[in-house]
């Protein structure tokens, strides 16, 4: 594992999580430094979503520690974690379907007290033309754009994204890839991604997860580009 922990924003150490008697995470340790784009890869059922949901406060840990900006957050409720500047975007792309895009953003502004939409809509200008459309009538890619935009309200320091490109057309994947690079200029990203070529393009570091354990950390840029991390899955 890479020993350089300068400017560490998130540090998860020896994390264990169970669903009743079924153990899902086994001594998981990961860290994310400020300004990084870290990607977590692994097959379905590897425990990736469980890790993110535990970090975000939706699942309670069994053992281990979750430290964000130097303070333990593993006993906080999910809304308290979000208030501290760590946002989680789940995999299901669920928005408030009966509300318009504008009303979804207004809810995000109400929660964060951030009404500066232009600073986040700059990443997805298409949403400006869809403000009065019901969110339930958006495409999967448009819903993902809306969710990311809502998550960026309040200027979080770290955003966890769970498979943001799943099920999207190649052109939309490219748009999100370009957006990730721009967002990463101001916001640290930790992303679960099944698209390995995309991972090779955007990741600063890659964690490989298998059967509830971190089995490799790929740090060298050339190794990431050549998708060396794939052999661990």
Image (cartoon, helix red, strand yellow):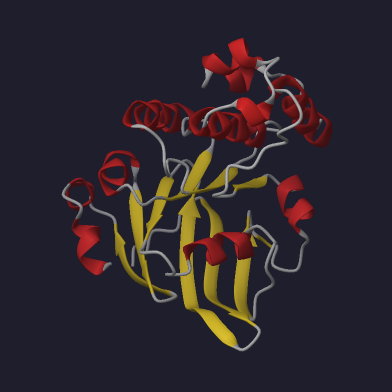
The one nearer the camera, 9 or 159, is 159
Q: Name the residue located 59 percent from the left edge and 49 percent from the top edge.
A: 90
Q: Quadrant of the N terminus?
A: bottom left
Q: Is residue 122 visible?
A: no
Q: Name the residue located 47 percent from the left edge and 30 percent from the top edge.
A: 185
Residue 125 pos. (x, y %): 53, 14
Q: Quadrant of the C terminus?
A: bottom left
Which residue is farthest bottom?
A: 21
Residue 180 pos. (x, y %): 44, 33
Residue 217 pos. (x, y %): 32, 63
The one nearer the camera, 181 or 131, is 131
Relative to residue 163, is residue 233 depicted above or below?
below
Which residue is farthest top?
A: 129
Relative to residue 49, is residue 143 depicted above or below?
above
Q: Name the residue located 28 percent from the left edge and 55 percent from the top edge.
A: 219
Relative to residue 97, is residue 229 depicted above or below?
below
Q: Quadrant of residue 76?
A: bottom right
Q: Is residue 23 visible?
A: yes
Residue 45 pos. (x, y %): 44, 69
The one nearer the camera, 226 or 20, is 20
Q: Quadrant of residue 15?
A: bottom right
- Horizontal side of 79 relative to 223 (left or right) equals right
Give the total number of marks visible in the rendering.
0
Q: Quadrant of residue 57?
A: bottom right
Relative to residue 145, is residue 222 depicted above or below?
below
């Amino acid at each position: 594992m890479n020993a350089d922990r300068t400017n560490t924003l998130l540090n998860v150490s020896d994390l264990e999580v169970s669903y009743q008697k079924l153990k899902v995470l086994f001594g998981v340790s990961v860290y994310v430094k400020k300004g990084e784009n870290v990607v977590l890869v692994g097959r379905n059922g590897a425990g990736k979503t469980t890790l993110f949901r535990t970090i975000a406060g939706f699942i309670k840990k069994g053992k281990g520690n979750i430290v964000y900006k130097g303070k333990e957050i593993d006993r906080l409720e999910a809304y308290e974690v979000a208030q501290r500047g760590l946002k989680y975007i789940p995999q299901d792309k669920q928005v408030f379907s009966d509300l318009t895009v504008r009303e979804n953003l207004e809810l995000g502004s109400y929660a964060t007290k951030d009404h500066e939409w232009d600073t986040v809509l700059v990443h997805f200008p298409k949403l400006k033309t869809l403000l009065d459309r019901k969110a339930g009538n958006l495409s999967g890619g448009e819903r993902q754009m809306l969710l990311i935009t809502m998550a960026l309200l309040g200027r979080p320091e770290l955003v966890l994204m769970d498979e943001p490109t799943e099920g999207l057309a190649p052109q939309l994947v490219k748009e999100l890839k370009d957006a990730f690079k721009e967002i990463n200029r101001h916001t640290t990203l930790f992303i679960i991604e099944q698209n390995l070529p995309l991972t090779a393009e955007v990741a600063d570091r890659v964690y490989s997860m298998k059967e509830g354990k971190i089995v490799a950390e790929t740090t060298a840029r050339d190794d990431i580009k050549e998708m060396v991390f794939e052999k661990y899955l």
